[in-house]
Amino acid sequence: MENIKEETIHHTAMKLAEEIKNLSIYKSFYSDVQKLVSSPSVKKEDFKQTLQQAMKEKGLDTKLRNTVFHWVRTQNKQNKLDPLTSLSKASAQWEKRIHKSLNSMCSDLETSLAKIRSQSEQEELADKWNELSTYSLDLSKYRPVYAPKDFLDVLLTLSGYVPFTKEDEPKWEFAHLPLQVKTLDQLRKIYQEWANGEPLLGVNPNMPSTVPGFATLEAERIGLGERVAVLGYAPVIQEYLKKGSPQCLRAKLWSQVLGADVKQQQIIYFNQLKKNVLEVDLMIDKLIFKDVQLTASNDDQYFVFEDLLYQVMLCFSRDGEAARAAGASALRVAVKGRHAPDCLIAFPPSGVIPFHGFTMYATPFCYLYDDPVQLYFMFRAFYMRYWHRLHYISTHPQGIVSLCLLYERLLEANEPLLWIHFRNININPIRVVFKWLMRAFSGHLPPDQLLLLWDAILGYDCLEILPLLALAILSFRKENIFQVNTLQNVDAVLADLSTISVIPLLQLALMKS
Amino acid sequence: MTFYKKCTDSDSILNKRNNRRLKFATDFDKSIVINSFKIRDWKQVLPNEEWNIYWSNTLNCRTLFNHENGYRFQDRQLINHFPNHYELVRKDLLVKNIYRYQKNLEKAGHPLAEKIQETLPSAHKVTRYLYLDFIPTTYVLPSNYKRFVDEYHRFPQSTWIIKPCGKSQGEGIFLINKLSKLKKWSRESKKCIQNNLPSKDMYIISRYIDNPLLIGGKKFDLRIYVLVTSFRPLKAYMFRNGFCRFCSIKYNSSVSELDNMYIHITNVSVQKHGEEYNSQHGGKLSLKNLKLFLEGTRGQHVTTRLFENINWILVHSLKAVAPIMSNDRHCFECYGYDIIIDDNLKPWLIEVNASPSMTATTMNDEILKCNLFDNILSVVLPPSGIPDARWNKTPDANALRDFEILIDEDSILNEDLILNEDLKVKRNT
């Protein structure tokens, strides 16, 4: 048995060694190792030992470990054919609808989906690049392609794919889909530290610390966090984030845990994206401008950052690497003004058609990074690991469909009276929380609470905390919900989340026995 | 309006116990003012009738305090201004009082007045206060015109901002960077003076802070509310929910933009008329979010220091005027402090307002100002709910709510007394 295990490890290691050669950091990493080998600290007689020791001292050991960590994490993201063909069919149909809508918008407005920008336009855009809020565009005829509500309607029809339904059962339950989701008890096992009642930073940062030398929990976490940041070892950082990060360390820790550090290479890459934005005018640019204007620019928590957000969202749309995450099939369109052979491009290169509120996936990072390149890579890393799951139809256990089902199951099992109330007033319970789930609560919770929630997403590397929080909020406000009986009034009860303390609420839900 | 709390049972019971409702008068026909009293079941009366609290405008307040009118305040009456608040609130008087405060401390050899010598990037050597340097160099015009010109010639590259002493809401403010521009103006103003206008100090000119901290490329200032219930001993409270007021256009320090008011003047009344003004957020960002942003991008240490320095400015500006303020027991006042942070994270005091606007520009603003007003009442009213000029003005923690104690010289004094008593007891045993 041991031999088989050894062999698989060996096999994986060989594969990994090959794969690493293809990674972008390989070249500089290899030359660093070469330099180390030629230094006096590495001896020919005891090559392996001294090299390993030298690598540890120079931080190359940590670098390698982090690379392996990130590689392993991305391996799970291989695109397999979606086992539930009904879902994959629905997904393909939905994408077709979006593309059709884009095309008709394009012909209605008598513009092209993609065209080369004129020299003067390029210059103007380059000039105003740092203050795109002053770049005037007539966006009055452009409308967002779809909104969370529309996406929800599509998801609800998924339930219609059930071959057998009893007559009296409402057709809108996700429970009909043969997807496995966890129970609250199983969630407790995942969020063990919370369920055990361990002190969390988001509950009371001023509570006295149990560790000698620190007056408060916050001071203790900062002390530990600084050491963790210096060590720079991603799995340790991930573990640390489970109990919440102080705001002053978040920027560093988040970028380390997702491998989104910005070096010269990243700056060059970002500038290339910017160049692409300047050269080719995609119709999507207008949609991006419109979305930033409608959402971030009107939001009293994020309006200050609108200029940064324009840059980030525009560049994101040109980033082909983002397309790998979702595996979506992008439109291929001709670029007006360009001639064969390379006149066809993916529209957009990122494969992501932004919907109303898409910008909100990026806004909270503005409280961590004021440099657009750092902001960009952080947002992109989050998108590629988490956010894309929230607006594509799939059977993935972290996908939006599974999250909706998880929410439904949790509500029915743990708040049966609420569940019955919703049935009695004929409101699908998913309707009142869907916009929270799809946006990972961005724009609904104040930034300080939101960042604590996203700490937990990173720390436990899963999105299941979103439906859990939705349930906890409903539970918290259930007395008010019982007193109303229209969708509008339920929405009103849940409209203002500014007084919600996210972490205590969640810990309470997980600790209940 | 869902954010006005309902009149509580305890309010009505109190009123019934008193056999009459408490009365308020106001010169401002604003819902924020009127509703805050109404939910406590107070009755509105006219200013010339018997009232318990008068939310007055500065003119009427001054008239009341005028000796010639012989108005005597009763114990159960409170008014929302101190008689000579202009010592703090008029731009020229504030500056004069702070300069005097600095000089007095320096003369007494007080460690607070310690000075430090610095070499500027331009190779100029300047001396400034280490702890008391919180207003930009300012001269009162026309009386200090000569001294200003001397300073101007020492640093000819600087920009200066001129503000009329008696105006507010950003009115009449302009920037200059050439002495010639000022000369033209001063010639015109001398003409006005010759035409029979009183020749008191009409303007101040201050060094313009041309390196403000920018967020998202935009300039902003802070508005912080400070409630003072007594000057001697000094009792002041800071409202936690201050906010930043952002300019709607990107900051541009180039000379050609000196006249573009929307860039430089952050007053909402000016910004409101700009094309870019957004009435959803009104260009206001909460102080809480500012702190979050600075901690996230600059670290905790410098952020904590910045906010400590802001508190320091608030306290010392009040200490500067405390000796000369008329400490009438019937008075309390909520000041609106305007502070600018430069890109070294150093805060500067710009001015203090006595009648911060009770008009709300956005929904959030309305909620904030309602809370502020209601909170002011809960701090100035004793536990009985009846105004009492003889009360010791020490609100309990529940009454403070969103106000935090900035300084309470009374309790410091009491602590000293208790400490002394303890020592006496120890010595005797």
Image: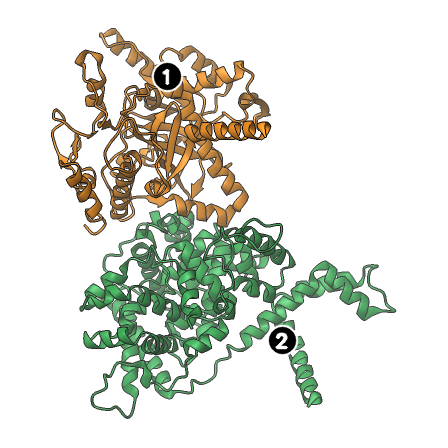
Chain colours: A green, B orange
Q: Is residue A438 shown left or right of residue B129?
A: left
Q: Which mark is residue B301?
A: none
Q: Are marks 2 and 1 in contact (CB under 8 Å)?
A: no
Q: Which mark is residue A19?
A: 2
The location of residue A92, given as percent across then percent down, is: 35, 81
Task: Reply above or below: A430 against A170.
Answer: above
Q: Do badges 2 and 1 share one subunit?
A: no
Q: Give the secondary structure at mark 2.
A: helix
Instruction: Quickly name the residue at label 1.
Output: B324
Q: Is residue B177 visible?
A: no
The location of residue A165, given as percent across then percent down, is: 26, 90
Comparing B302 with A324, the one in front is B302
Given the current orientation, which residue lies at the most extreme front position? B429
Which amino acid, by three-letter code, is at mark 2?
Answer: Glu
Q: What is the count of numbered marks?
A: 2
Given the current orientation, which residue lies at the most extreme right position? A45
Report the quarter where the C terminus of chain B lies. Answer: top right
Comparing B213 with A223, the one in front is A223
- Cα separation, mark 2 vs mark 1, equals 77 Å
